């Protein structure tokens, strides 16, 4: 077997093991086998606010990194470049509010993560865990 055949077979096996995922990063066909059913989120009733996740010569960042929203709006994080996630660090947010678990990494340009705004009125902070120390953070004000 020549080197390029070996590489092609190895790549096929690795990609196959990763499994197909939809644009949100969820395994194709919904939740992973054996995973508990997710609680049904309240339907979005407001607007969709797009937040781009970017890595380039200017650094790692969210665009915009400050947004205002109302309950029922949806934050739509869209990967432009790099590899990023979204999390709501407990040490930077009020206690007593339930936040989503840190997301999986967005890895493919155009991949999205949609989060309905369900928080009470207040100021909240999100970040990309691998890049937070480099300033990849954001602020949400719920009106």
Image (tube, rainbow, N blue to C red):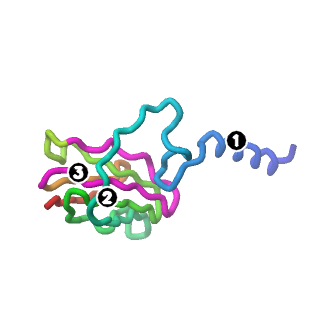
Horizontal side, residue 122 vs residue 45: left or right:
left
Mark in front: 2 vs 1: 1
How far is disc 2 from disc 3 in space, using C-alphas? Answer: 23 Å
How far is disc 1 from disc 3 in space, using C-alphas? Answer: 40 Å
Please, what is the dominant secondary structure of the magenta stretch? loop
Which of pointers 1 and 3 lies earlier in the amino acid sequence? 1
Which of pointers 2 and 3 lies earlier in the amino acid sequence? 3
Q: Indicate the position of residue 94 as horizontal and vertical percent values.
A: 14, 45
Chain part drawn in magenta: 98-121
How far is disc 2 from disc 1 in space, using C-alphas? Answer: 34 Å
Q: How many marks?
A: 3
Instruction: Kindly identify which residue carries mark 2.
Output: 136
Horizontal side, residue 38 vs residue 90: left or right:
right
Q: Residue furthest right?
A: 1
Q: Sort mark 2 into few (<14), some (14-19) or many (20+) by Cα contacts within 10 Å.
A: many
Instruction: Kindly identify which residue carries mark 1.
Output: 13
Q: Nearer the viewer, residue 35 or 138?
A: 35
Which of pointers 2 and 1 lies earlier in the amino acid sequence? 1
Answer whether residue 78 is visible to the viewer in this image: yes
Of the numbered discs in the image, which one, if any, rests on residue 118? 3
């Amino acid at each position: 077997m020549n080197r390029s055949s070996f590489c092609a077979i190895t790549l096929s096996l690795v990609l196959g093991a990763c499994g197909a995922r939809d644009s949100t990063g969820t395994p194709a066909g919904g939740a992973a086998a054996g995973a508990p059913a997710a609680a049904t989120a309240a339907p979005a009733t407001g607007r969709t606010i797009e937040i781009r996740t970017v890595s380039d010569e200017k650094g790692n960042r969210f665009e915009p990194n400050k947004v205002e929203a109302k309950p029922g709006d949806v934050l739509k994080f869209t990967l432009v470049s790099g590899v990023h996630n979204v999390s709501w660090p407990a040490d930077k947010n009020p206690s007593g509010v339930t936040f989503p678990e840190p997301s999986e990494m967005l890895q493919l340009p155009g991949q999205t993560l949609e989060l309905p705004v369900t928080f009470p009125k207040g100021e909240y902070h999100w970040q990309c865990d691998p890049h937070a120390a480099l300033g990849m953070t954001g602020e949400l004000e719920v009106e």
